Image (spheres, grey):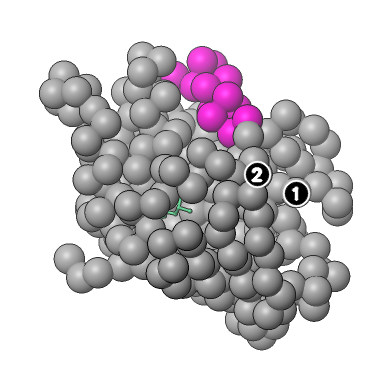
Amino acid sequence: MKKVIFDDFANIYDEDMAKQKHLDGDINLYLQYAKHIKSPILDIGCGTGRVAVPLIRAGYQVDGIDISKKMILKFKNKLTKNELSKNFIYIDNALNWKNVKKYNMIIMPDDVLLHFLSPEQQLKILERCYLFLKEKGILIIDVFRQHYENLFRYESTTFTNSSGRIRKIYSDYETQINKIEYTYLDGKVRNNFVRWISESELRLMIKISGLKIIDIFGNYDKSEMKYSSPKMIFICQRD
Ligand SMILES: C[S@@+](CC[C@H](N)C(=O)[O-])C[C@H]1O[C@@H](n2cnc3c(N)ncnc32)[C@H](O)[C@@H]1O
């Protein structure tokens, strides 16, 4: 498989994430839903297993798929032989992945939906989630909420945060694709891309995919979603 964006991040990903605050509480939210919905669970864009590993250790059966071989290697290295024999980790593009297994719960933690860089691809992955779910199964979508005033404030602005990284965001207003340029302490520049999505666009895509929205939150503490909320967390169900 050819080199992909997150191959460049694999070596620094876990250390960097441990210093970030914006995901505080997400694992707890997935554990709460797993308790009710149960296994099997599919983690799309599972990366290094940041969320999948705690779910596996809590006793759930979790399969993971990610397009980055290097992220997946980090994930696999965390699992015991016994865990690897029960939880299946795939390296593939989730848009084309040939899969027949059906899941009770699908998760796409930390903006994974936004890594599909066109509305067509974002809709396609939601339609695939519908196919991969069992009846009454749920999909948890977690994406950041775009605050439109930031589009202008962010462009070419440099942020330095306590984790010792510099982040520059370049917004393309037409495609809604943000190029995010990270410079870490190792001095290497790594580029990432996300296509942000508006609330109305996401609601429409979910509807077209055949899924039903059963809950919406503005953050991992299940607070009500408002314009000012940092997140859009949609809990969707297949009828
Ligand atoms: C921001 S990371 C999130 C990783 C993990 N979900 C977490 O919360 O720590 C996005 C992940 O999505 C994966 N990804 C991007 N496009 C993908 C695709 N088409 N198919 C499968 N995985 C993809 C990337 O390789 C990366 O590991």
Question: What's the mark number on residue 230?
Answer: 1
> Taking 181 as reference, is 34 above or below it?
above
Q: Is residue 29 magenta?
A: yes
Query: In the image, 60: left or right of 76?
Result: right
Magenta region? 25-40
> Can I make out residue 169 in this image?
yes
Observer-nearest of 3 and 17: 17
Residue 65 against residue 175 in the figure, above or below: above
Residue 115 coordinates in the image, percent (x, y): 48, 63
Q: Quarter of the image holding residue 52?
A: top left
Query: Could you tell me if the residues under marks 1 and 2 are in contact, i.e. CB atoms within 8 Å?
Result: yes
The one nearer the camera, 79 or 226, is: 79
Give the amino acid at mark 1: Pro
Q: Amino acid at mark 2?
A: His
Per the image, label 2 sits on a secondary structure element best described as loop
Label 1 near ligand 1 (CB < 8 Å) = no
Q: From the Cβ of disc 2, is ligand 1 less than 8 Å away?
A: no
Residue that appears at 41% across and 49% down: 13
Q: Is residue 24 above or below residue 199?
A: above
Q: Residue at x 63, y 34 (%)?
A: 24
Q: Position of residue 51 (x, y in %)?
A: 45, 34
Quarter where residue 88 is shown: top left
